[in-house]
Amino acid sequence: MFEPKIFQTKALESLKDYLERAKRLGDPKTAFIESWSERGRPSVTRWHLAPGLGNIPYVCIRIPTGGGKTWLAARSLRIVRDSYTHTQSLHVLWLVPSQAILEQTLSALSTAGHPYREELVEAWSRPLVVTREGLEAVSPQDFASRLVVVVATIQSFKAEDTGTRTIYAHSERWERHFAALSGIEGLELSKEGSNRGKPIHSFVNLCRVFKPLIIIDEAHNARSKLSFDTLARLSPFGILEYTATPDTSTASGSNVLHEATASELKAEKMIKLPIVLAQHSSWATTVAEAVRTRNALEEAAKAMGDLVRPITLYQAQAKDKNDPTVITADKLRDHLIQNEGIDPTHIAVATGDERGIEGVNLYDPTCPIRHIITIQALKEGWDCSFAYVFCSIQELKSPRAIEQLLGRVLRMPYAQERPSVLLNKAYAHVSSRDFAETASALKDCLVDKMGFERIEAEVWTEVADFFPDEGSGTIVGLAPDGQSISIPAYAPLDFWLFAPEPGLLVESAGTRADGVPLVRVSGSITEATITKLAETLGADSGGERTRAIARNLANYRLLQATMHRVPPAGPDAFKVGSLFAHDEVSGELIPVDEGWFVNRGRLDLSDASRFSARLTPEEFSIPVERKVTELDVVADKVITRNTRYDRELFTAEVSSEFYLNSLVFWLDRRLARSDVSQLVLQDFLSRLIHHLTDERKLFLGDLILHKYLLEEKIRLKLDAYRLKAASSGLESLLDLPELDGSLEWEADFSFSKDRCPYPQAESASSYGFSKHFFPVVDNLRRNGEEFDCAKEIDALDEVETWVRNVPPRHQWCFRLPTSRDDFYPDFVAKLKDGRILVIEYKGAHLASDPAEREKRRVGELWARVSKGKGLFVWAMKRDDTGRGVRQQLNTALIRK
């Protein structure tokens, strides 16, 4: 079974939390606002819902290109069932933007062994995935008991005049689904003949009966008024959108519930970054360099034993009978064979006229294809992670063309880091007269079309010096971290000329492959210095070399302005101590976490005096009357949303199949947890079910009928018991006047410039922090109290470097354990004397909150265990004695 990546798990957890909250509150809008508020974004208050849809859960998950949106959508179905509908059957209308994507999605959800299909099978065992046409083979019984997914294009539903679409028309093939229904409101009625006044037997009316969940793939394509009207006609009970680039406008913007970043995908080895961009003055040079790049990548793969066969994608020019000089696909193929010596069997052409890769398995080790030529774009939905090099011999001005081609080279083979650093990057060779314009177009595409943050597009786009043009001087090198740039020196440079300029470093950087010396520029650079450097190093009296150097230095200066500051001198990593304990069995040191506190607090469900196997009526009760949220079949009659379950009829049917022990075993599988043995949990569940049936006199058939609701309430009970045990375990430590030796302080965590994909979004404004460890100070808004605290930390003489510790969407954050979850202090600083200073800043309104008080005591415990190696400060604007933040920090620093 496919294991989700961390960013995917976070997205799913956000969805689960939201749906549970929406179910509990009965208000999707309030649940949405609360979800963002609890994640530190109380300013998110806009909720957009199109007229006619009602107040339903309608949210968007933003995942950049390459992040597995389709798999996430498949996994989300079980979350909807378990957290919102609490029904075994589920009806889903899965809308995609094109026929090509429809075929791809349908195949993935239907093919045995495919990860998307396995997601559905694990949750439903016999899921049905069909097109609209295939739906006619699905029986009413299937609708009543199974997962039914209908994959369709959204275009097939759009119509100003519904009479022009067959999905709105009467068809006898749907008759059996309507035969047992009556009194259903909201159906479109016939206006003609003997059926006048009766429901039209149409696909859309069938949707109005089901009230399906709608999944929208690439939801930014469905934001028009017509799209919203179409969705309203289908009467969904909820809508989930998945896209890399959600609409954020006031008029039609999506309700974005969760946002993943490209840095997170890179950290999980899902995509190749950085993108190495090279610009060339002629199309022949562009092609030659793309061939050379691909060959070097293949050699690197062979040398490391990597089973990857790099592929180059070429964008040729369309035929033009009035211009015989255009480089068509045929001409480019001939050029590769005749001038680059490419084996014809290694080339495939994929255009509207020629389909050279259709049906070809490019992952097959025996497949010879290494070069694929296209014109506008490959078939939409085409995907091969072996594609590494993007080569365009025409001007890149169409965002659509860039997106189609660039998106094909971003995915990482097998979603694993490759053994060669060269194979962890993507490469783009372009023929363009204006490099700055080309680079800008590529970055705009990453942001506008592929879901990158603006600063990520800047940092992860690397100007190529891997394969520079021979002697042209137009290709220069931007370092991967964006902190320096290497430029060719065609004339000697007196480095002392630039010594007086503050914040600027100009130094020798070796030579290029062609022997031309390189000069590295780092720090802040003025326009006047750019002009002086370009004129000196270009040595061509303002010619092309001078202009190229000036353009690239200007791009570098713009990037520095975006990133706000010159990086401080300092170490490449610094370590921070964490809490460890000795394992009771092996004696080995293990990290202290919530589970360790639970174990210390003795979560023993067999101890009825501490952990009662009972649910009060307030904790769980059977709804006296409930609307049916699934279609079921009893005696060939379909029960709909507008009727009530006939309890006796339902339970009579299942009583012979389900009994108390089977319910216990089902709950055991759903509620299994590592800190409770299976035998103890089963005994606890058995006692709880007996309590409900014997003491509270609830009918077993009702418990089976409402087993998902019962599971939810038992899970809440177990979570409360786990918190009780963890709190007890933690309190037993915090209350000790002296440490009992059970904890140790080990410097196992480190902030590393090489390994930490520090977030690149929501940066603080251009305040010049001089000691922050990473180029960008993330999630720190100017003019806030935390911003003022950061300025005080940065100003301390004792501080060598510090980090804004960004929680918790990245695993590369320092954390401390509490009884509830992990605690991420706001700031971590390394002092010049080697000690670690950890600061948590709190507003006065939170100081008395029990959970916050526990964080403070854990931080103080961490400092005690460190034996002087670590300091902890619970900073406030003014503490109880009236001291400001600077005084609070100074007081902590004098402790020994």
Image: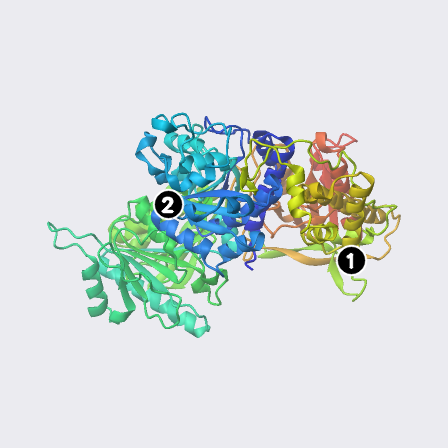
**Amino acid type for the residue under numbered disc 1:** Leu
Q: Nearer the viewer, residue 513 or 17?
A: 17
| Label located before the other in sequence (1 or 2) | 2
Residue at image location 63% in from the left, 38% down from the top: 20
Marks 1/2: CA distance?
Answer: 56 Å
Name the amino acid type tagged 2. Cys
Instruction: Give the numbered dot on residue 445.
Output: 2
Q: Is residue 95 above or below residue 678?
A: above
In percent of width and height, residue 428 lies at: 34, 56
Seen at 56% across and 44% down, the residue is: 770
Q: Residue at 84% across / 57% down in the picture?
A: 741
Instruction: For label 2, count other residues whose C-alpha is less than 10 Å away and answer few (under 14), some (14-19) or many (20+).
Output: many
Name the secondary structure under disc 2: helix
Q: Which residue is mark 1?
A: 679
Instruction: Give the quadrant of the N terminus.
Output: bottom right
Q: Nearer the viewer, residue 229 or 375?
A: 229
Q: Based on the displayed image, in which of its 4 quarters is residue 389 positioned?
A: bottom left
